[in-house]
Image (cartoon, rainbow, N blue to C red):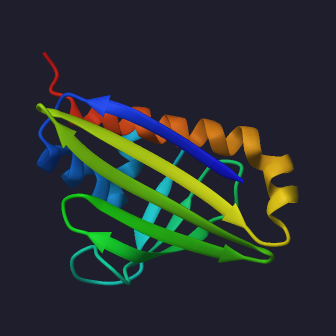
Amino acid sequence: MRFEITVDIDAPIETVWGHLVDVERWPQMTESITRVERLDDGPFGKGSKARVHQPKLPAAVWTVTDFDPGRAFTWESRSAGVVTTGAHILTESAGTVSARLTLDQKGPAAPLIGLLYGRLTRRYVTMEAEGLKTISTPQT
């Protein structure tokens, strides 16, 4: 199962990236996340871990598996029968940043998880992308 959304953001890529990697503040940008706890010290990067709490879902520990500073990071969460991978990719063109968020679920339980939580997951990924856009765009 795969979910993907891209939003265009009229803000410097550094601003968008700053909000994207400040995972503990994600609850301020979206109602799809109630709390994020970093489980390690130091700068956010490859190997970083965070416990993410979301309404209607069990808390999940996410581990950063790939990190391209200023551009992208991928992290994954494992639970019984499913591996969930989330990617956050920024590209810049003519002063606009495209933020692409993807969520992939694989494993023997993925079809059941998709059936039970697919609509909710799609809504949450959309809320997170829109929240990133809102928090990154200068208010006038």
Q: Residue at the spot x=39%, y=55% of the render?
A: 88
Q: Is the residue 133 above or below the residue 15 in the image? A: above
Q: Which residue lies furthest to the front in this view?
A: 93
Towards the viewer: 22 or 107: 107
* Residue 98 occupies quadrant: top left
Q: Residue at the spot x=65%, y=51% of the render?
A: 2
Residue 121 as seen in the image, left or right of residue 47: right
Answer whether residue 31 is visible to the viewer in this image: no
Quarter placement of the N terminus: bottom right
Q: Is the residue 33 above or below the residue 46 in the image? A: above
Q: Residue at the spot x=11%, y=32% of the render?
A: 95
Residue 25 appears at what percent x and percent y?
Answer: 33, 53
Q: Residue furthest top?
A: 140
Residue 13 appears at what percent x and percent y?
Answer: 16, 45
Q: Residue at the spot x=35%, y=65% of the render?
A: 73
Quarter placement of the C terminus: top left
Q: Is the residue 104 above or below the residue 62 in the image? A: above
Residue 55 as seen in the image, left or right of residue 126: right
Q: Is the residue 22 above or below the residue 38 in the image? A: above
Answer whether residue 11 is visible to the viewer in this image: yes
Residue 106 as seen in the image, left or right of residue 134: right
* Residue 123 occupies quadrant: top right
Residue 83 appears at what percent x and percent y?
Answer: 67, 72
Residue 29 appears at what percent x and percent y?
Answer: 37, 40
Towards the viewer: 47 or 61: 47
Marks counted in the figure total 0
* Residue 69 occupies quadrant: bottom left
